[in-house]
Image (cartoon, coloured by chain):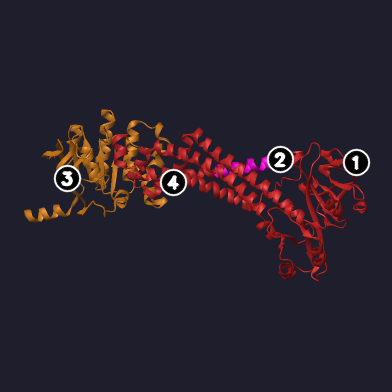
Chain colours: A red, B orange
Amino acid sequence: MIFFKLIVTNLRRHRIRSLISVAGIAFSVSAMLTVVTILQGAIGMFSGILSSDSEIIVFERNVSDLFFSNVPATALEEIAGWPMVRRADPVLFGIVSSADHPIITCFGVTADDARIRKAIWIQGDRFAFGQHSDDVVLGERAAEFLGARLGQQVPIGHGVFHVIGILKTANGFEDGGVFMPLSSAQSFFHKEGTSSVITVKLRGKDDAALFNSKVKEKFPDLIALEDAEFTRSYSQFKILKATAWAVGGCGLLLGGLGVANTMIMSVFTRIREIAILRVNGFSHVQVAGMIFGESAVVSLLGAALGLLTGTCLLVALKEVPALHGYVDVSVQPVVMVIVVLLALSTGIAGALYPAAYAMRIRAVEALRFE
Amino acid sequence: MNSLVLETKARNSIVLSAEGVWKSYDNGAIAVLKGIDFEAIEGQTTALCGPSGCGKSTLLHLLGGLDSADRGRVSVHGVEIDRRFNRLRFLRHEVGFVFQLHNLIPDLTLEENCLIPTVAAGTDRRIAQERLLQLANRTGLTHRLGHRIQKLSGGERQRTALCRALMNRPKILLADEPTGSLDEAASVAVFDLLLDIVASENVTLVMATHDRNLAERCDRLLEMHDGKIHEVEYAR
């Protein structure tokens, strides 16, 4: 108890300095949590698009981005006929633009695609989808920012399309996207006879390994991955995740420097006190433990405050109309644990030099000269 | 008993000793101790007198294992304080320090300050509390246990420092001008208390002081000058 009091006493002595350090860690934790959660939410949504009523995705091997993937229709036909396959749906991804919105995701899908079947149709008739080449269905948010209503003509890219439906999904990408019949999308993006991916639903989950090896054997230019594996291995996701952690890590590094500064000052201003503790039998380890304990308290307080502010920020961001569907407020426990551990490690790292300095203090000199 | 027996008995009860101890600072530029020979017998009170800078504090630091001699040998119970000496155990269990400035931690209470050595030594909390109450009772600080150091008078602070030094029941007490920052009345009161406790607990006291009157109340008075013990007077 007294040992803990020795730890917090010094933090209380220099309240402003301690608060600034806590704020530094809190800011870093908050930034890391926000960035990582938003990006993981985005990745989750993108995975959600791919895994809609399917468990395997087939795409062109060695492409850097699914938008550049070309899966021939012949492959689709053959795969759809394999006995272990319940469904095989082609999806063509494209980017289109309108006057005020340079990037709108376009999904070329068939009429019985799960994305069309399972969405909530706010306006329009699902069974009308795919009957005319210039028909499009808009996601709710896309309809909002395009200012489009059912039955209207909307300019998209170099074409003008007829809005036959507006649908609502839980997925921000889909909600902000445009759905075209596959053939129309192939023509629009000059990708006749191909799709970007095939999403596959198997009859039994145990068939996945067999399916994957069969794709490898029959179509060497294609690769089949289970959804979870795809999310783990897709290079774009990896880059995004790495970027998120790197950005957060830089924030924590700055926070750690703040802690280091605080701890150095803390040691410098209590040299005599440390000397007294040494004279009274404190070991090097106990002195270092006191310094590390101080930084750990700062880090944990900062982490707690950061988690709180970060979560509040995410909740606030979720309410921003433009980000509707993009922000997943449910922070993953593993992210929280990692963020707290990183904050703690940063604090401990920041206390390394101060603790080493404190351990080197010679009681006799501190007592003689101060 | 013949003189040989007496000599042997005294030798066996030597608690602290320094033999030909030299100590200098600034790479030898300032020689503080110049071949000091010293012995402290168990339960004896020894006063080191002398002008400022004569090496009293330095000798106390060497005897307490806080510093190392350049040359010579400092021993505790016949064991030389060197690299192999367990200084931590010595500081925790065998020696207590009282300084001119009380050196208490101002943000802690009297009780918490006194318990610091027991925290360092990992003493059982119940035992530590019992000892604290015993010492607080003897020093008249029981009613001040929960008070912060800033609230205490100079005499109370020095009595607190005395309590802290004795918490782990050390057999050696090294006091460096323990009453130097007190007025005469408080100084006498604290010193009376100090002598009373060390006598009742059979503690060996080595005290550096400028106060000749206090020094003469010790069993031995050693005069230090120019880094040497020049003369030995037996006050009693």
Q: Chain of mark 4?
A: A
Which-is-in-front pick, marks 1 and 4? 1
Amino acid type of the residue tagged 4 in the rendering: Leu
Q: Give the distance between the C-alpha atoms of the residues marked 2 and 4, in whole angstroms.
A: 37 Å
Residue A317: numbered disc: 2
Residue density around tag 1, few if under 14, some if 14–19, many if 20 or more, within 10 Å: some
Foreground pick, B10 / B201 = B10
On the same chain, marks 4 and 3? The answer is: no
Magenta stretch: give its range: A300-319
Q: Give the distance between the C-alpha atoms of the residues marked 1 and 4, in whole angstroms.
A: 66 Å
Residue at mark 3 = B21
On the same chain, marks 1 and 4? The answer is: yes
Which-is-in-front pick, marks 1 and 3? 1
Residue B217: image quadrant is: top left
Which-is-in-front pick, marks 2 and 3? 2
* First-in-chain label (2 vs 1): 1
Disc 2, disc 1: CB below 8 Å? no
Foreground pick, A79 / A140 = A79
Residue at mark 1 = A153
Residue at mark 4 = A352
Amino acid type of the residue tagged 2 in the rendering: Leu
